[in-house]
Image: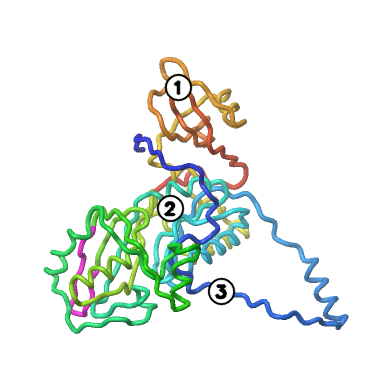
Amino acid sequence: MTVTTTNSAIDAKDADAPNASRDIFSEQRSDGPRRVNNDPRQHQKQGRQNHQPRRDKRDVHGWVVLDKPVGMTSTHAVAVLKRLFQAKRAGHAGTLDPLASGGLPIALGEATKTVPFVMDGRKRYRFTVCWGEERDTDDTEGRVVRTSESRPTADSVRELLPRFTGTIEQIPPQYSAIKVQGERAYDLARDGETVELKPRPVEIHELILVEHGDNGQSVFEAECGKGTYVRALARDMGRILGCFGHICALRRTIVGPFTEQDMIPLEQLEALCNRAASGEGSLADALLPVETALDDIPALAVTRADAARLHRGQAVLLRGRDAPNNSGTVYVTVAGRLLALAELGNGELIPKRVFNLSGLTASPARNHGSN
């Protein structure tokens, strides 16, 4: 565990609401005029349906890193996992476009309190750029707006990459979740409006060319910080190279502390849920512990007496020779169990988020990085 203290905000929100790019595959509901059916047989049928036992929601706490398939929205993925686990609360740690596949960390129960720590972490993508066309969505789902017959050489692409490494200014795509006068940019774009989005700084830690074929496509890997749009990278590189370009394949391989080793395909997860329902397994085997999201935060163990005070929302004074002398955000444990997120400073420990992990949690053998 890295012991460097992070000062990330710990006022986490439950992430049930979508917070990024496009939900072009979302289902829409039409609330038309209601028709009254006076058939008594229909009323009897509805009465039987209304008295069917409902599946009770339960307390489930932990992380599931879904290997999201292409075509599924992040919001739909959360709804599916929430249903499979019969969980009371669920949210994702950073939207993944329907076109994209790969790591979508989904927080269940008390893990939703740790979502900001994952969203603020590093992200790594493997993506393919198709040269010769720019599209209004900057990916294959959009309308072609510019074309070119020229194609870049591998050397010209490599020479360009340093300009997109480090802290750069990036204009978000027109189809993004950036708010413009209270409206999402993608909603305005769907209505045919062109909005002027301001450039903003983003951090590109690494951008490398993996493959460059004769088919007019190049494969890249990028590691970047929060708020970076890979679609915008393809758009901007294509403009500078004079050949235009758009994303035609995108996969997220790392997000925060979660890697491809942590990912579980939806089919495998559904099979595990079916086995668990028949008593042949446990859903706990699919969960990663809540504290997995806190890998970059130092842990602090306290006594049961101090834990009782923290659990009541009271601050604790840390005295003695073994008292920590650092400051910042820590996660607190008691008897090896996660208790709270707290701020440490001047020998005082102030609870900010207290966890109640009663219910289904990750199995003891389910450690980070193992499946």
Q: Percent from the top left, x then y, of residue 110?
A: 56, 46
Mark sitting earlier along the chain (2/1) = 1
Asked if residue 213 lies in the magenta stretch, the reply is yes
Which residue extends farthest left?
155
| x 28%, y 81%: residue | 146
The three-letter code of the residue at mark 3 reads Glu
Which residue extends farthest right?
40
Which quadrant is the N terminus positioned in?
top left
Q: Percent from the top left, x then y, of residue 370?
A: 41, 50
- In this rendering, position of residue 157 left or right of residue 317: left
Q: How far apart are marks 2 and 1 (CA)?
A: 39 Å
**Dot 1: element:** loop
- What is the quadrant of residue 347 in the picture? top left
Q: As displayed, is residue 142 above or below residue 127?
A: below
Mark sitting earlier along the chain (3/1) = 3
Front-lying residue, 289 or 133:
133
Mark number, residue 236: none
Q: Mark 2 points at which residue?
A: 371
Q: Name the residue under label 1.
A: 347
The three-letter code of the residue at mark 1 reads Gly
**SS assignment for the magenta stretch, majority:** strand
The three-letter code of the residue at mark 2 reads Asn
| x 40%, y 42%: residue | 295
| x 45%, y 61%: residue | 95
- Per the rendered image, the range of residues in magenta is 207-219
Q: Percent from the top left, x then y, of residue 79?
A: 57, 63
Q: How is the image coloured?
A: rainbow
Mark sitting earlier along the chain (2/3) = 3
Q: Name the residue under label 3.
A: 27
